[in-house]
Amino acid sequence: MFFRKIRVTKWTLVLILCCLSCRSIDCQKASQHKSADQTASPDAAVTVASQKFTPAKITDEGLLLSNRDASSNMLIHGYMQADGRFFLANVEDCRQAVLLFRRLRPLAEGRLANRIDYRFMPDFGEGKSVIQEAYVEWRSIPYARLRAGKFKAPLGLEVLRSDRDLTFVERSMASDLIPLRELGAQLEGSVRKGTVTYAMGFFNGTEDGDNSNFEWHGAKSGVARVFLHPFATARHPLLQPLGVGLAASIGHNHGTPARFNTIGQETIFRYNQGIIADGQHRRLSPQASYFSGPIGVLAEYISSGGTLASGNSYRYLSHRGWEVAGSFFLTGEKNVYEDFRPAHALGQDMDCRHWGALELAVRHSDLRFDASAFPSYANAASSARSASESAFGINWHLNRRTKLMLDCERTEFRMATDSVPRLHAEHVAMTEIQFAL
């Protein structure tokens, strides 16, 4: 009996030792797993971080490429504008229709090392291949940015507005007195919380309405512009949006002088053969804007004069133009100078609230050529002394990327003398479909 009890006790001890051994093995394995997990945690963190980083992604603005810390990036987008011009009567009293891709512009812009912005925009519209903009901008100081390359010189209020945000299919005739884009460098910025904006630069002199190439030639031009919002801090809300500015340039141009076109892009003034620009060129443009609620108004006066040579004789000729343009959003959106976004995009349900934004626009512009240009520098029989344009337009912003435009414009002309027949008034309906990516 005693031995039987001992035998039972012995087997009981063996069983207990086995259980303790198994428990020790399990604890050792658990410890090894825990240690392995702790050792692998840095790699796991890197793996998770790698999964979160995406060098390319689609955003509301376009295709965004960036490095890991987002200090450098590139945004790829662009826009296309397809136009139709339907002439009820042109300057020769003929009916015609023109369909064309007015602008076809891919665009790449971004930032390098959080300090340098860049922009590159070619244009393949109208069957041509042109680099419209290519520049870099140093942004180390908030109120003083240095830009160099090809871009819009700080002169005309309407010209400085982005082509995507134009109220009408074409800019006014007064804007033809301003160069489109020039090669040069400028310093720009704003102070007093944006109430004062300034820009000054040195550019490769460009003729009126012309688009400079990348050839640095003998003509030079200095440009300066100041734009103020004098009532930005006023208590009365109706005065706060008012902006006034003054832009001027002085330089020396040499080459073929510009010709001037109607809104329908038909020539109404050209210089005689053999006339060249050779001397000082000056421009002056007082300007104003007012954007309050659904109302937006632009107004500017432009004077552009330069010395022209005809053989051994020289004469300073000055042309002048002005425009007033306004628009009103029937759907109540806030009118802005640039980057407009409709409150409600066109929706699939097509209810009364989701039809996009509807904008009505009116404009009047006037362009007068120097009377001294006739007849030695311009032909009085084929070139107009002045042109006066009135336009009405309606724009449908389906969404942020799609806009439909319809303009009806009438332009009348006055000749240098009453002895020559007038150019026929231009009546044109212009349409545009704009797609932005």
Image: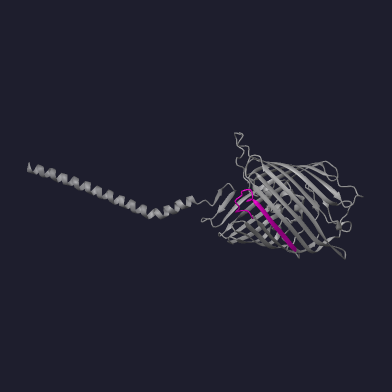
The picture quadrant where one finds residue 344 is: top right
Would residue 364 be found to the left or right of residue 199 on screen?
right
Q: Is residue 156 visible?
A: no
Q: Is residue 312 above or below residue 392?
A: below
Please state the extent of the stretch shown in magenta in the rendering. 230-250
Q: Is residue 140 above or below residue 5?
A: below
Q: How many marks do you count on the picture?
A: 0
The picture quadrant where one finds residue 140 is: bottom right
Q: Which of the pair 180/340 is nearer the observer?
A: 340
Q: Most extreme residue toward the right, as rendered?
A: 419
**Quarter of the figure that contains the N terminus:** top left
Q: Position of residue 64 (x, y in %)?
A: 57, 51
Q: Which of the pair 198/428 is nearer the observer?
A: 198
Q: Is residue 395 above or below residue 252?
A: above
Q: Most extreme residue toward the front, as rendered?
A: 235
In magenta segment, residue 58: no
Q: Position of residue 369 (x, y in %)?
A: 82, 54
Would residue 291 be found to the left or right of residue 301 on screen?
left
In magenta segment, residue 235: yes
Seen at 69% across and 50% down, the residue is 163
Q: Which of the pair 361/105 is nearer the observer?
A: 361
* Model colouring: one colour
Q: Position of residue 396 (x, y in %)?
A: 67, 40
Seen at 71% across and 58% down, the residue is 247
Q: Is residue 392 visible?
A: yes
Q: Position of residue 93 (x, y in %)?
A: 85, 43
The picture quadrant where one finds residue 225 is: bottom right
